Image (cartoon, grey):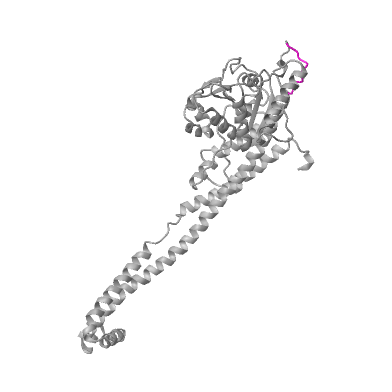
């Protein structure tokens, strides 16, 4: 890795089919994270950080009572018959509907491998067996940037679900970028289970919940539709978590040229909401990319600063260890040397080491002899014991400080940290600004740049 290297793009057969700037930006940001050589996930992992690559698509969860038109809307949006539809409860689990290279159906484990962000679902007993994915090759509308989550049809009464459906849908809603609540005007709109889940979600993420009166063309006359909407609004207003100003509930239905209807169809509002959220997802992804870059650079700077502190600390502890060790060795050596010098006469000492060195030994041991003579003869044994204990303490302190050193970075580790920082500053951040500029060019005038 070096600051001049460009991030290697992950091979993807779909890249040639990418046409929208938003899709290119989301995919390239995703590749900056997962690149096997210089990916931010890999770099962060080596620094002890955990980053998740951004999703390349937004998650749209659709919930409501059974036969509310959830699956029908998905089929209409994708322009392919993927989900079963009907009056019976066709969807009993969670189904991910996404675009891909090949038409395929995935089961629970394969689905969680495709969506690692949803692996916490394993904590919900029984849910995994009721999670699946449908991969379509459709490129209609903004489907290439959307993953729909079709939820179980909700009913009141004795209906028994094989898992805690309320908790599971609430968790899914918290992870999703959008939550569409479809109310069926044909008698099931006020399903208490649906309202309970919506109220719970509203407390956690009310800003991404949108209400729609589905199958509006089947509600009869305009007065009938207004009566149904008033009943729904009244029921929602009774719940403190859902009683909010600016409440909107567009009427939607699946267009059918064979069955024209005078009812206003606001299904385009749904598409516009999805497109707006995609644009916001691009902005959030680019912003998160910058935050993650700053986090990595901050971590690198912190590790290098801590290493300098550790090096200084180790230098101090080594000095202390050396001083205590030197004293622990020199003091006994000096005491032994003084006794040896005193056992020899001046002439014998000069004959052994020479006149100059003999004078040095005499002067260096004179203080030891004076102190020894000053000690009463009956206390000299205790002094010797204390002296030995003191020397042992010095040796112990020397070994103690020698073992107190902190682990420091090797030269290779320092070079790698410097390369990480250079790569972020010289490659990733400039590329992030290029992507931001490309995104803004879709909407801003050229002279604004």
Q: Is residue 198 above or below residue 87?
A: below
| Quarter of the view holding residue 269 | top right
Quadrant (top left, top right, bottom left, bottom right) of the C terminus = top right
Image check: 176 left or right of 237?
Answer: left
Say which of 420 and 283 sits in front.
Answer: 283
Say which of 28 and 393 sits in front.
Answer: 393
- Magenta stretch bounds: 259-266
Q: Residue 39 in the image: state x and y as whole percent.
A: 54, 41
Q: Is residue 406 visible?
A: yes
> Which residue is situated farthest in the front direction here?
238
| Quarter of the view holding residue 215 | top right
In percent of the image, x 49 and y 61: which residue is there? Answer: 309
Is residue 264 inside the magenta stretch? yes
Q: Residue 3 in the image: state x and y as whole percent.
A: 57, 47
| Quarter of the view holding residue 21 | top right
Image check: 416 left or right of 384?
Answer: right
């Amino acid at each position: 890795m070096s600051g001049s290297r460009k991030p290697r793009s992950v091979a993807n057969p779909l890249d040639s089919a990418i046409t929208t700037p938003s899709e290119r930006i989301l995919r390239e940001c995703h590749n900056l994270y997962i690149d096997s050589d210089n990916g931010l996930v890999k770099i962060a992992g080596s620094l002890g950080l955990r980053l998740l690559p951004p999703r390349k698509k937004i998650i749209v969860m659709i919930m409501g009572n059974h036969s509310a038109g959830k699956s029908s809307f998905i089929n209409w949006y994708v322009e392919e018959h993927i989900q079963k539809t009907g009056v019976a409860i066709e969807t009993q689990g969670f189904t991910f509907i996404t675009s891909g290279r090949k038409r395929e159906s995935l089961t629970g484990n394969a689905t969680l491998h495709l969506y690692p962000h949803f692996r916490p679902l394993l904590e919900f007993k029984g849910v995994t067996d009721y999670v699946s994915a449908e991969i379509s090759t459709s490129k209609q509308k903004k489907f290439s940037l959307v993953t729909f989550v079709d939820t179980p049809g909700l009913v009141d009464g004795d209906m028994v679900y094989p898992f805690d459906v309320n908790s599971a849908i609430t968790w899914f809603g918290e992870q999703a970028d959008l939550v569409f609540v479809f109310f069926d005007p044909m008698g099931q709109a006020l399903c208490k289970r649906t309202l309970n889940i919506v109220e719970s979600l509203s407390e956690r993420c009310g800003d991404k919940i949108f209400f729609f009166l589905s199958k509006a063309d089947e509600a009869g006359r305009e007065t009938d539709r207004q009566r149904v909407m008033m009943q729904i609004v009244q029921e929602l207003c009774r719940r403190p978590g859902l009683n909010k100003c600016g409440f909107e509930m567009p009427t939607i239905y699946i267009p059918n040229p064979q069955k024209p209807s005078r009812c206003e169809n606001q299904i385009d509002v749904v598409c516009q909401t999805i497109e707006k959220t995609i644009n916001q997802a691009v902005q959030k992804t680019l912003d998160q990319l910058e935050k993650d870059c700053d986090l990595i650079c901050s971590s690198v700077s912190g590790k290098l600063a801590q290493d300098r502190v550790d090096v200084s600390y180790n230098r101090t502890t080594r000095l202390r260890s050396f001083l205590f060790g030197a004293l622990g060795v020199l003091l006994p050596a000096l005491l032994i040397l003084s006794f040896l010098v005193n056992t020899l006469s001046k002439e014998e000492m000069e004959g052994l080491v020479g006149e100059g060195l003999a004078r040095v030994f005499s002067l260096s041991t004179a203080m030891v002899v004076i102190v020894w003579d000053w000690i009463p003869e009956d206390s000299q044994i205790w002094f010797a014991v204390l002296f030995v204990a003191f020397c042992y303490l010095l040796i112990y302190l020397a070994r103690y400080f020698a073992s107190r050193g902190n682990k420091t970075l090797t030269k290779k580790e320092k070079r790698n940290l410097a390369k990480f920082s250079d790569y972020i500053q010289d490659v990733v951040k400039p590329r992030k600004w290029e992507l931001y500029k490309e995104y803004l060019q879709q909407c801003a005038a050229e002279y604004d740049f």
